[in-house]
Image (tube, rainbow, N blue to C red):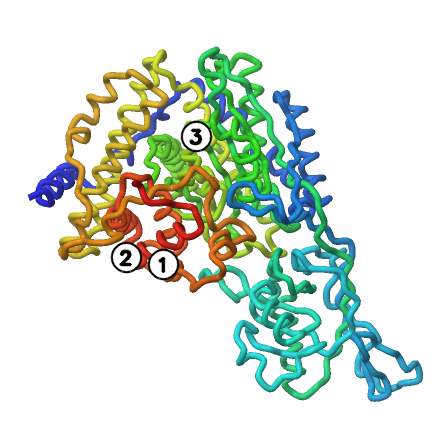
Amino acid sequence: MRRSAHLAFFLALVPATLLPSRVSAQKAPLLPEKDVAALAQELSGETAKRNLEGVVRFHRQRGSQGFHSAAELVAERARAYGLSDVAILAFPADGKIFYGTQRSRPAWDAEVGDLTEIGVCDKEKIENGKLEFNTKCEKFALPKVLKIASYEEQPIVLAEDSESSDVAADLVDVGDGTKDSDYAGKAVKGKIVLAGAQPGAIQDLAVGKFGAAGIISYAQNQKTAWWGEDENLIRWGHLETFSPNKTFGFMVSLKTARALRDRMSKGERVTLHAVVKAGQHPGNLEVVTATIPGADPKLKDEEIAFSCHLDHQRPGANDNASGCTAILEVARTLQKLIANGQLARPARTIRFIWPPEIEGTLTLLNAKPEFAKRIKAVVHMDMVGGGPATKSVFHVTRGPLSLPSFIHAVAWAFAQFVNEQSLQFASTGSAEFPLVATEGGKEPLLAQDAPYTMGSDHDVYQDSSFGIPAIYFNDWPDRYIHTNFDSAANIDPTKLKRAAFIGAASGYFLATLTAQDPRGYSALQPVLSDDRNQQTAASFHRYAQLDRAERESAMALNVRTLRQTYASASSFLPGTAAMEAEFGLLARTPDRTAGTIEAPALAGDALVKFARKATPRGPVTVFGYDFVNDHSGKVTRPKLLDYEGLWGAGEEYAYETLNFANGYRTGADIRDEVSAEYGPVPLELILEYLQTLEKIAVVERNK
């Protein structure tokens, strides 16, 4: 009976047509047209790209001199633009200090990283990694030194967390290098191995178990339609920060690796000389921050934050100099327009944050808990400038179902507006707000409305220990991500301008939205109603893949999400009776009961209510460190982490399983929630993961 009621209610929410109701709309949403015009006029894709060209000069590894130089550049620009409270916050990082679930990774710097091939004849010898030259030898097939990789020329060739070395050794091909059989019958000890996997994925096996002296990797980029297509790409490489098997790693292109493998397959001896001066050391994680102070005495301590991540390899243009310079351009534009009176000063403070990815945000929110208390919403930009060559698609990504929020409807409303305006301009040559940069392209934006995906700092904010809703703007795919070709030449100023506009408009609207301004609610109401219809239709199509019992359970849970999305606006508009009336039917919809997917009676931990503990704060799978693995004594890996669902993978299931553990949900409830979000998952996998989290004191049973 309950399921039938939910199904009827869900179907009633689907609009008469499944097409978005704003397809033909041209009027700017939410903000007065004069505000939209001011933002569109002032935002500059060229200024953003000029700042990007400054950032990409630096190899921006955590705690490094390169990162500090980039931080100084951003801080200097923020001061020049007139922002307030500009600071570079420094947090000690030594490999021992914990910030919530993040074990601080020591700073890492490099000065030298040279990899050369040397000609060797039978009168020369290598002992203990040192080459003794016989100067009379005339059998060199190669020049004495043939350069393969140089950190000075291309810092990306040296894997992060490499340690100082001076080694001459023969090269051995170990295939991918990820399993014992890759090393069978091969004399690896004291040699340098050539592998297809990332250095960090093989160092404990190659160096720790088989005694290799170092690693050369030709790991390919993230798999997209263009995977492995360009054999000249050099992929950014990483060693494991906390591995006891310290070593060095060099990254080479597929073209270079194929040539080396071909020669070795013919029985040719390949001897390399690796000279590395680099290593971890106690240092600081640095976070740049600045503000535009709010005007309302009662609300100025609340903040709308703009976030990105400043670290990455050189050049790292789209990932993520683009996001960092886009929010810098938002800061410049808002500050200027507010200072000259074209925009009213917002009630809430607007904060800008430039940290190292994930670990910097997690460090900031734990070390400075007042930041977490003040921030009501986040606009996070990670890769927002990819031009046509990158093949990128711009996404406006929603939050997880564990944290429903109206802010995603706000962002999507502005993105739809830019889609409409940019498509009209591309199609006809005329639009009121084309948002085209003089030096940029004229293609339509075609932004996509995307469900929650993981992989950047928005994961930290939306973790249940912080519960801060975040809008996530990101390009995907990008065929040059994490490679030497992620350069400023592939960044489109028009794309930067449009991303900055959507972010600036969204953040400014949220900063000005108060119960005292009736225009805020009157503008928000139709946007929320339209978004509800679109999301209901999208969910209906997605759930069509499920069987009847799963579909009806997922629909029931979706109703709860819609209700909470509307209710989330009350934190910005307290006491607004009209908001309650708007979602009256949603508010009267009954909650579902536990275990709606599986018919058999539930028992044991399926009926236990699990609650997240107050500490540690943050996701348990973070950057360069695995809290679960480290604290569980390396017990058998929870099966949930390797599960593949209809719409998500193990990492997403695990993230949301922890987020849903609020002390009111049973194990079966949590299984139902994540099944509605990512597709059906066996109850025993959820319970096993919750039991693992209980073992390491992240969750507890609600007594």
Q: Which mark lies nearer to you, 1 or 3?
A: 1
**Is any part of residue 473 visible from this angle?**
no
Q: Is residue 385 left or right of residue 553?
A: right
Whole-angstrom CA distance, mark 3 to mark 2, is: 31 Å
Pointers 2 and 1 in contact (C-beta within 8 Å): yes
Q: Position of residue 469 (x, y in %)?
A: 40, 34
C-alpha separation, residue under disc 1 versus residue under disc 3: 30 Å
Q: Is residue 40 above or below residue 247?
A: above
The disc labelled 1 sits on which kind of residue? Leu
Residue 236 location (% of width, % of height): 61, 58
| The residue positioned farthest toward the front in the image shown | 703
Cβ–Cβ below 8 Å for labels 3 and 2?
no
Q: Circle 1 is placed at which residue position?
A: 640
Query: Label 3: how many residues lie within 10 Å, few (<14), some (14-19) or many (20+)?
Result: many
Marks 1 and 3, the one that precedes in the sequence: 3
Which of the two marks, 3 or 2, is nearer to us in this view? 2
Disc 2 residue crowd, few under 14, some 14–19, many 20+, Cα 10 Å = some
**Earlier-in-chain disc, 2 versus 1:** 1
The number of numbered discs placed on residues in the rendered structure image is 3
Quarter of the picture containing the C terminus is top left
Amino acid at circle 2: Val
Residue at 63% x, 40% y is 52
The kind of residue on which mark 3 rests is: Ala
* Pointer 3 residue: 377
Q: Judge left or right: residue 38 versus residue 547.
A: right
Residue indicated by mark 2: 681
The secondary structure type at the circle numbered 1 is helix
Q: Quadrant of residue 49?
A: top right
**Can you name the residue that lies furthest to the right here?**
136
Residue at left 50%, top 39%? 381
* Residue 481 visible here: yes
| Mark closer to the chain start, 3 or 2 | 3
